[in-house]
Amino acid sequence: MELSKNLIRKKIVILGAGVIGLSTAERLIEKYNELNLSKFGPIDLTIISETFAKDTTSDGAGGLFRPDDRFIPGVPKEQVKKWATDSFKYFDQLLFSKEAGKAGVFQASGYQMFNDERIDPSYKDYVYQFRSLTKKELDYFPKKFKYGYFSTTIGIDTRTFMQYLTNKLILNGVEFLMKKIESQENFIREHPQFDIIFNCLGLGSINFCDDTKMIPIRGQMIRVKAPWIKHFYYTDDNCYIIPNINTICLGGTRQKGNYSVELDEKDGKGIMERCKELCPSLESASIEWEWAGLRPHREPIRVEKEVVTCSHTSRQKIIIHNYGHGGNGISLSRGTCMHAVDLLLNTSDYLKSKL
Ligand SMILES: Cc1cc2nc3c(=O)[nH]c(=O)nc-3n(C[C@H](O)[C@H](O)[C@H](O)COP(=O)(O)OP(=O)(O)OC[C@H]3O[C@@H](n4cnc5c(N)ncnc54)[C@H](O)[C@@H]3O)c2cc1C
């Protein structure tokens, strides 16, 4: 009962409907059922967001599982490992279940190639397969690289996955509300009914809680139809080709501090040129859509519990922050959401208890 007291007859709100908001809701429902709390009535869960589905950053992401702790700054290696392995386990279970097609989860194999020798990424021990490329394999490519590896990991067609989560949440009675939120203080004053608040606002946390550590890393992408391409290709010169279910993602750019979600013609041209150099058959691919999104970057990713007192009612509110996943939000979604929900349930020692 101690563990569950924060869930019984509490009104819970999740702010933000990207992959983090939706995955948090899924995890809360699971926990509620695991703890056998439905005898107290159904979970009271609302998601409030300014945008949903196609208008979120999550919707456009390439969706490849490759969270490398070297590119997740400020988070202890063991913590990244825990988030990543929890996430991998979740997606792996989906992949080998009847739900895989509905959830948009598939096995993805491919090449990453570099102009210099690299240390292996931290995820190499828990993806399905990982090995260095031989010189002969490197020589197959029209563009020359010095070093590379081949791996089999998980691909997540994010648009399909987000729809899958949304359908599941609707079936479980979650309420959805479209609304722009100004600040933490205003929100608490205007919505006194909520006891527990999950902040999954991504970049919206800049205004919500004055977080000056948050910064966008802009990425532009072109989606093409090229069903003959079955592998992913990544190089260290801003070039990636990632097959999803209906399209292939061509990228990319990484522009720190750029807030523009408008398409940039020069960026688009550069992406096409780099991808065609690596994979000339893209010449006959048809463009489906183009997109620019902002990776919500923070050093470190913030998964943290805060207890605040409403200045009007003097009632205490629990706020769990979960944002700042940068270019790894799909990969780390499940792990960070498990952590966030555990913080609510007062199992504050998430890392120690599960390692
Ligand atoms: C080009 C590109 C490629 C990527 N590829 C990958 C990849 O291959 N693998 C990977 O793991 N990750 C990838 N990412 C990163 C991934 O997309 C993000 O880390 C992830 O989507 C973050 O999820 P989120 O839910 O925190 O944010 P978001 O999806 O941005 O969701 C935030 C939510 O908060 C809401 N919100 C914000 N402000 C307010 C407000 N003031 N009021 C109300 N609601 C508000 C928004 O409407 C939205 O619903 C990529 C990103 C980009 C841009």
Image (tube, rainbow, N blue to C red):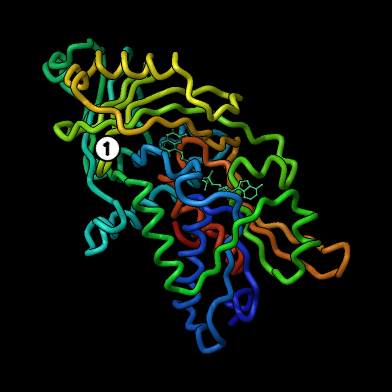
Return the x and y of residue 218 as percentages of the image width and height.
52, 28
For the residue pair 303 and 78, the one nearer the viewer reads as 303
Q: Is mark 1 within 8 Å of ligand 1?
A: no
- Image: 219 above or below 15: above
Residue under the point 42% across and 39% down: 60
Q: Is residue 149 left or right of residue 204?
A: left
Q: How many marks?
A: 1
Return the x and y of residue 202 as percentages of the image width and height.
58, 44
Q: Is residue 52 left or right of residue 91?
A: right
For the residue pair 22 and 136, the one nearer the viewer reads as 22
Q: Quadrant of residue 147?
A: top left
Residue under the point 58% across and 46% down: 323
Q: Residues within 10 Å of mark 1 (few under 14, many from 20)?
A: many
Return the x and y of residue 22 as percentages of the image width and height.
49, 58
Return the x and y of residue 183 as percentages of the image width and height.
75, 49
Disc 1 target residue: 247
Residue under the point 86% across and 70% down: 313
For the residue pair 353 and 188, the one nearer the viewer reads as 188
Q: Tag 1: residue type?
A: Thr
Residue under the point 63% across and 78% down: 5
- Image: 140 above or below 329: above
Q: Split into 4 quadrants, where in the image is the C terminus? A: bottom left
- Image: 353 above or below 122: below
For the residue pair 170 and 279, the one nearer the viewer reads as 170
- Image: 51 above or below 148: below
Q: Helix, strand or loop at disc 1?
A: loop
Q: Split into 4 quadrants, where in the image is the N terminus? A: bottom right
Q: Is residue 200 left or right of residue 103?
A: right
